[in-house]
Image: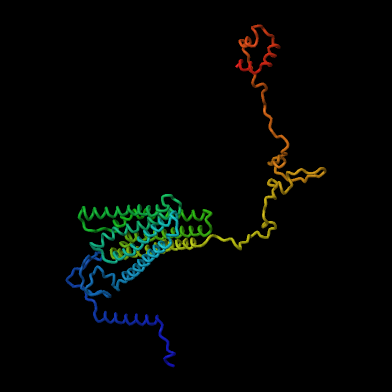
Amino acid sequence: MIFSSWKPPSPLLLLLFLFLSQWKEISNSTTSNPPTAIASNSSPLPPDTIVINATFEEAVWGCGAGLDPAYRYLCDRHAVWGVVLEALASLGFLLSAGLLLGLLLRALCTCRRRSKGSGLGGMLASMTLFLIATAGLFALTFAFIVRLGPQTCPVRLFLFGVLFALALGCLLARAMALLGFAVARGWGEPALALGLFTVQVVIGAEWLLVVLVRDGLPCEFTQEEFAMLQIYVLCLLAVALLLSLHAVCRSCRSYGYTGGNGRWQGRNEAAMLFLTVLLSAAIWVVWIVMMTWGNGRIGRRPRWDDPVLSVVLVANGGVFLLGHGLTRVTLFCQEEAQAKEGPLSFAGWTSPHAEIPGLSSVKEGQENGSFENDVGTGKGRRPGRGAAREPTLKSPYESGFSMSEIDPERDYTIPRPQTTNTSQPLLIQTHNLDVLGDGASLDENELQMKLLSTGGTSGENGR
């Protein structure tokens, strides 16, 4: 009875117990082995100096003893920002990759039911590029958590602007597609996004080639130079913000014939697109102000530079993923669900004006006097003697002549003008008179009698 009434503890209590026991072991290890300080003979460093590839003899709490100091923020529990951002970046990367794989699998399953002109390929390619850029932003966070060095410096400079240019190029192309631009229809949308992305690739590659290859200088840059490299990305952000705002205003004012669901989906997509770009613009304004003015003002430069940029990547990646990526995938699934439905059935449909008498009766066209049926009204038959013909309503444009009243015994031929004696000549020359007579002169009456008696001969000679 005792064992039968026993219930196992809940999983939350087990997790809490394990967490407390682990925390106790960590606290005991830190008290028994305190971290050793830096050697006293080492000269103190200025507070704003970043040490690259330096060796420390202190034991970092949460990391191994032989770990490179450049990776200490990945596991340092004193500087908790690195661990938190690492976890969030990993979660965002997995969500973006999972969303991309799910979209591709669903598109492969449904592409056979789509026609060639449905625009599925262009939309799928654009969403693929956007999700790749979003996943790249989450992955780039690790390059800013790791300390700045010869390996991470080119990666930071090149990929930061390139990935943001790809994501914002996709948003800009989508805004143009919502506004109905011909260049952003179908496969033009991903092509436009790639074209906008290529410009930033050229800018970043040119800077690296000039500084590292041609001049042979180390990869060093100031906060102002890093912000200047993102001018093109800021232009894309500003144009995308204006176009998305215009798309929202246009979707609220326009009235189409595509139905309520399609119109509301367009409004929701435009609104989410504008919200995504607006939040991205706010994030960019904050980090540029912090990098160029804020950190130096409060005396936290360059200590806060890497945490600020890491937070920017995670925050903006989350905005991209939730604001546009998840919204577009949801709308795509809704369109597929609507495409699977059969044609509209009006069985059982009742009109809201069904109570009006005579509305549901079958109309034969007899209500209008201009379209009367000749057979039904007796039109075309002659009434008998003394029978009064019923008056009928006629249109003012209707002719009074009816084809059913034609009598086949009567002649309805339209008379035409004719000429008599068409075989007779109109003019008779004098030299033909000798043929008719014997050279003697004839008066007018005798000449007419001769011509009438010999009409055929004289007609031929006259001609």
> Is 396 displayed left or right of 237 in the figure?
right
Please tell me which residue lies in front, 89 or 45: 89
> Is 260 displayed left or right of 37 in the figure?
right
- Tell me where residue 96 sits by quadrant: bottom left
The vertical placement of 448 against 403, above or below, is: above
- Tell me where residue 397 sits by quadrant: top right
Percent position of residue 452, x then y: 68, 16
> Is 177 displayed left or right of 47 in the figure?
right
Q: Which residue lies furthest to the right in this view?
A: 386
Percent position of residue 421, x then y: 67, 21
Task: Please identify the quadrant where the C terminus is shown.
Answer: top right
Residue at image position (23%, 70%) is: 68
> Is 325 displayed left or right of 203 in the figure?
right
Percent position of residue 403, x then y: 69, 41
Residue 299 seen anywhere in this rendered image of the structure: no
Residue at image position (34%, 67%) is: 89
Please tell me which residue lies in front, 439 or 212: 439
Query: What colour-coding does the image apply?
Result: rainbow
Residue 393 seen anywhere in this rendered image of the structure: yes
Task: Please identify the quadrant where the N terminus is shown.
Answer: bottom left
The vertical placement of 275 against 402, above or below, is: below
Please tell me which residue lies in front, 297 or 74: 74
Q: Residue furthest top?
A: 440
Percent position of residue 199, x then y: 32, 52
- Tell me where residue 279 sits by quadrant: bottom left
Q: Residue furthest bottom?
A: 1
Total marks in image: 0
Please tell me which residue lies in front, 424 or 39: 424
